[in-house]
Image: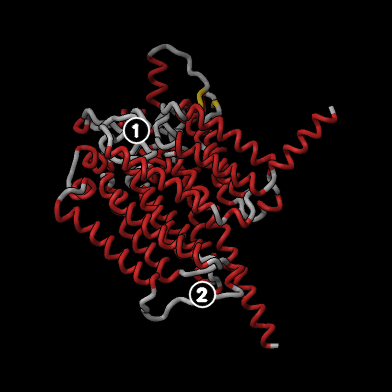
Amino acid sequence: MKTLTKTFANIKRNAVEPRVQFYAFVVFFGIVFLTGGGSRDDIQSLVLLRPIAILFCGYALVTMDPVNWRGRKFPLLVAVSLMLLLILQLVPLPPSIWTGLPQRQIFADIAAIASIEQPWRPLSLSPSKTLNSLFSLAVPIAAMMLYLNLDRKHRQRVLPVFIVLCAISAMLALLQLAGPSRGPLYLYRISNFDNGVGLFANRNHQGVMLSVAIVMLGSYAASLKPNVSLSSLKFYGSVATILVFVPLIFVTGSRAGLLLMAPGLLTALFFIYFGRYLSESASRSRRSPSPKKWTFSPRNLVLLAGAGAVAVFVALPVIFSRSLAYDRLFGTNELSELRLQVLPTLLDMSKDYLPWGSGFGSFEYLYKIYEPRDLLSPSYLNQAHNDWLQLIIEGGIPAILIAIAAIIWFFTRMIKLMLNWRASQFSKYTALMCAVVTAFFLAASVADYPLRVPSVIAVFAVILCVFNDNVPAVQRSKMKQRSQEGTLDR
């Protein structure tokens, strides 16, 4: 018995080591990207992913340090709030209450016509879909918990992990394009075959992730280390990777990726040219000033060459009309027209199901009730292709309040970042990168549903946590600066 107790004590002691916790983070995200690249609830790999995510949640709880989590939990609390809302949507209600909810009368009439006694029912009109949505939250919650357990040193390695996973997806996309259509390299039964989707099922999600990765690469290229050779390797490697990602976005055929690529490139160039920052600790002893004028340094020459190469990559598909992304952006197809045509219907649905919503995951079935006759076609909508409206339809006012709280938190943090911008050499750029990535994901959700993909929402959740960590770091730099100035004055 003593031996067993000692063994468990050794396992727990090893499990809380920073290095082991970082490896757990890397392994988890590797599993998420390999098995969670689609949004459909009938993907077989989810049977493995979600239990694994729950196990990692348990690991994170066992190894957590409450002091380390202090003041850093708001993004996690938002996810937990959504989880509690979904649980409430599954609580059975008596018939007298349920039939009084908006748009429930049709179901009550069906039961009356069939001479069926009105049962107790949950608020959700599709309990099985809501239960699926509840289990889907295990992935982002596990991702955030694993991140919160990391120490400061390993938090700075999170960005390279995401970049490497995006690079793997890009390499797989190249192999898919070189291989046969519907070949074994496509990981999902329902996918955009003949396109380079990488580790995803949908070309738009691949395009959005590559655009986000360009922003991450720009930030990573600008983060220097005292070791000059390592800094050069990071810089040149990041620029080269950006030049690979740009043409891949064109050939994916993703409109969202193409629309986000331009601001992504501009943001990356901003980081590369103006960033040039050290870690916060190193910057106090060795500051790296931003250049005031152009010099013919290797860094600036590579930057200029990179900008020129990007311009060539952008221009060639237009000149030769070979870009599927351009064709889809400026052309029309049945699905894109359908998205615009259903917008009035979506607005009607969002009003009809206020204040409590229809239940998360229920949109696919409810749309069949509302679907206009003139829009009937072989194509169908399993999602609203507008996550902002779908959130209102399925979650009602409670979901709106959670979203408003998150938005207020985000803009409050942004104001603090801007007010203390000049005080920091490192954290401000990391926080800005996270803000841009967050904005990209939310903008893509206006006409699509990227945050319903497990791998995408896991990255999104961790990016919010990184943002939440770096804004207070900027504030602390401001306080140190004032303290030093006060000491000099005395």
10 lies left or right of 323:
right
Q: Of residues 412 and 277, which is closer to you in this image?
A: 277
Picture coordinates of residue 234, whole percent (x, y):
46, 60
N-terminal of the pair, mark 2 or mark 1, is: 1
Picture coordinates of residue 38, whole percent (x, y):
40, 35
Residue 437 visible in the snapshot: yes
Amino acid carrying label 2: it is Ser
Label 1 crowd (10 A; few <14 / some 14-19 / many >=20): many
For image coordinates 49% across by 38% down, the residue present is 32
Q: How far apart, in angstroms, are the residues tagged by discs 2 and 1?
A: 45 Å
Picture coordinates of residue 397, whole percent (x, y):
47, 44
Amino acid carrying label 1: it is Tyr
In the picture shown, does residue 350 fall above or below 404?
above
Label 1 belongs to which residue?
186
Label 2 belongs to which residue?
288
Residue 428 visible in the snapshot: no
For image coordinates 39% across by 48% down, the residue present is 209
In the picture shown, does residue 447 fall above or below 239?
above
Q: Of residues 221 and 370, which is closer to you in this image?
A: 221
Picture coordinates of residue 471, whole percent (x, y):
55, 63
Q: Quadrant of residue 473?
A: bottom right
